[in-house]
Image (cartoon, rainbow, N blue to C red):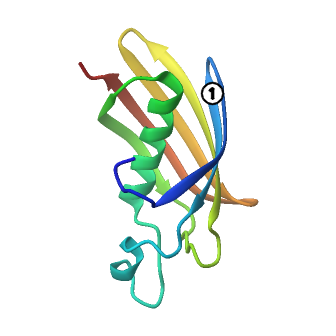
């Protein structure tokens, strides 16, 4: 975990072409003191890192993201209001590339849609 104690992994299910995970964001993490004071919001870069970490866990590989083709933040993730996030990640393999699509939800609300490409690092 790059950002220690930012979240806990509550559920994790992996199949060959998808990952489903539930995490709980630590609303008391220091990242929220600066982003933003009095109105904490999960930084987008942290969400992208969480997706990468979940894919790495599922594939048991260290990955690098050379490209993202679509990142849409649909709703603000305030950990004081919505600390539980459900991530659905679909995987598609093309040669040495792993193409990932993610939908992150807070209950029924879509918070993030992401499409990116990863490669295994050596």
* Outermost right residue: 108
In the displayed structure, would residue 1 be above or below residue 94? below
Where residue 67 sits in the image (x, y, percent)? 31, 35
* Horizontal side of residue 29 vs 24, given as left or right: left
What residue is rendered at 54% in x and 25% in y? 91
The quarter of the displayed image where residue 6 is located = bottom left
Q: Secondary structure at mark 1?
A: strand
87 w.r.t. 43: above or below: above
Mark 1 lies on residue: 18
Name which residue lies at 47% across and 80% down: 40
Other residues around mark 1 within 10 Å, as few (<14) / some (14–19) / many (≥20):
some
Q: Quadrant of the C terminus?
A: top left
Is residue 69 left or right of 93 when viewed as pictured? left
Q: Residue at x 64, y 70 (%)?
A: 82
Q: How many marks?
A: 1
Relative to 59, 110 lies left or right? right
Does 72 appear above or below 114? below
Viewer-proximal residue, 47 or 33? Answer: 33
Q: Position of residue 61 (x, y in %)?
A: 39, 23
Q: Residue furthest bottom?
A: 38
Nearest the viewer among 84 and 111 is 84
Q: Is residue 98 found left or right of 85 in the rendered image? A: left
Farthest residue toward the top? Answer: 95
Q: Please tell me in which quadrant of the rendered image residue 34 appears.
A: bottom left
Considering depth in this image, is 75 or 107 the residue closer to the camera?
107
x%, y% of residue 45?
36, 56
Residue at 39% over, 56% down: 4
In this view, which residue lies farthest toward the front? Answer: 5
């Amino acid at each position: 975990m790059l950002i220690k104690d930012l979240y806990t992994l509550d559920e994790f299910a992996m199949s060959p072409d998808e990952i489903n995970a539930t995490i709980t964001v630590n609303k008391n993490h220091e990242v929220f003191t600066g982003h933003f004071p009095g109105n904490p919001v999960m930084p987008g870069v942290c969400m992208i890192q969480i997706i990468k970490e979940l894919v790495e866990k599922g594939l048991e590989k260290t990955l690098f993201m050379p490209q993202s083709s679509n990142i849409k933040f649909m709703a603000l993730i305030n950990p004081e209001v919505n600390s539980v996030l459900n991530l659905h990640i679909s995987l598609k393999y093309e040669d040495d590339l792993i193409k990932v699509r993610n939908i992150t939800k807070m209950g029924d609300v879509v918070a993030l849609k992401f499409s990116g490409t990863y490669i295994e690092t050596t």
